[in-house]
Image (cartoon, helix red, strand yellow):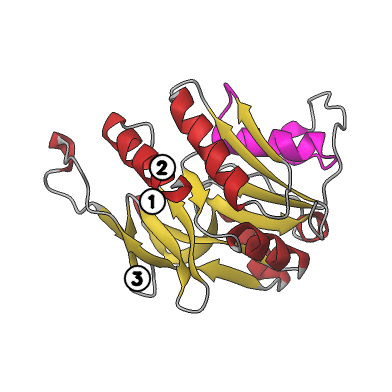
Amino acid sequence: MGNHNACLVSVFMDNIDPKTVELQKKVVEKYNVSKYPHFQIKTNATHALSLDYFWGINGVKVETMQAQNLQKQMDFDIILSLDIDCVPLSEIAIDHYVNGAADSKLIGNAQSSNHINNGEHMFAAPSAAAIHREIFLTIGKPSANPTVRGDVLEEYTWKAEKAGIKLDLIMPLRYDDPIVRYEWEKDRDLFWKLPNGIHYGQGTTYGSEELGDLFYHNFQIFQSNNQQKFWERCEKALA
């Protein structure tokens, strides 16, 4: 085990190919040098409610779980959310996020909610985001549910900003060209823009010049053409 009482959690539904789940598990195992537990949880609930549930069984009930009879099953200080189509790319990636959370930061992959015309706000996205229990309590243990002002997990960032919690948003370094452009996509850009002008899209690598490549997030793994791309990226990481 590493220096912190931390874990990783990846939730997924039954529309995810088992090969995706297995490859993510193998890549995480390779780069999880501190051996933090990694929970891959199949769920029928939404991504956000599944994260709320995970906090509940970790002893912190958010509002959406108040009516649920949840028994405390674990006791981790730091939770690193990791989308099922997101994998670490180096041996420092997981530790960097966990250490950031241990340093009282909300740390995560930078994203913005352009789909609700709120693209001027950057937040730590659930593709890879870590937070300490004490910081989570300080910001009011918000639900991960999307709201009128943000996407899944964005409330963490809104509440952290209001509480004066330090943010560490990891920027996209590059993204892949799309393999297939669907008919409904023919008149739209297949990338998204952060408020600072940096672009990201399907197959985004996050990191920095100093730290190198940290995480790869496939985005939209439920689309069949994206699965093969994710598998190939995982196999490359394992080679």
**Which residue type does callout 1 highlight?**
Ile
Mark-to-mark CA distance, 2 and 1: 35 Å
Q: Mark 1 points at which residue?
A: 116
Q: Which SS class for mark 3?
A: loop
Nearest-to-viewer mark from 2 and 1: 2
Q: Where is residue 40 in the image (x, y as percent from the top left)?
A: 62, 33
Predominant SS of the magenta segment: helix
Q: Is 77 or 66 nearer to us in this picture?
A: 77
Q: Is 201 on the left-hand or right-hand side of 217?
A: left
Membership of 51 in magenta stretch:
yes
Tell me, for residue 235, which label it has, or none: 2
Q: Name the residue under label 3.
A: 198
Q: Which SS class for mark 2?
A: helix
Q: Is 183 or 2 nearer to us in this picture?
A: 2
Marked residue nearer the N-terminal end (2 or 1): 1
Query: Disc count in the image?
Result: 3
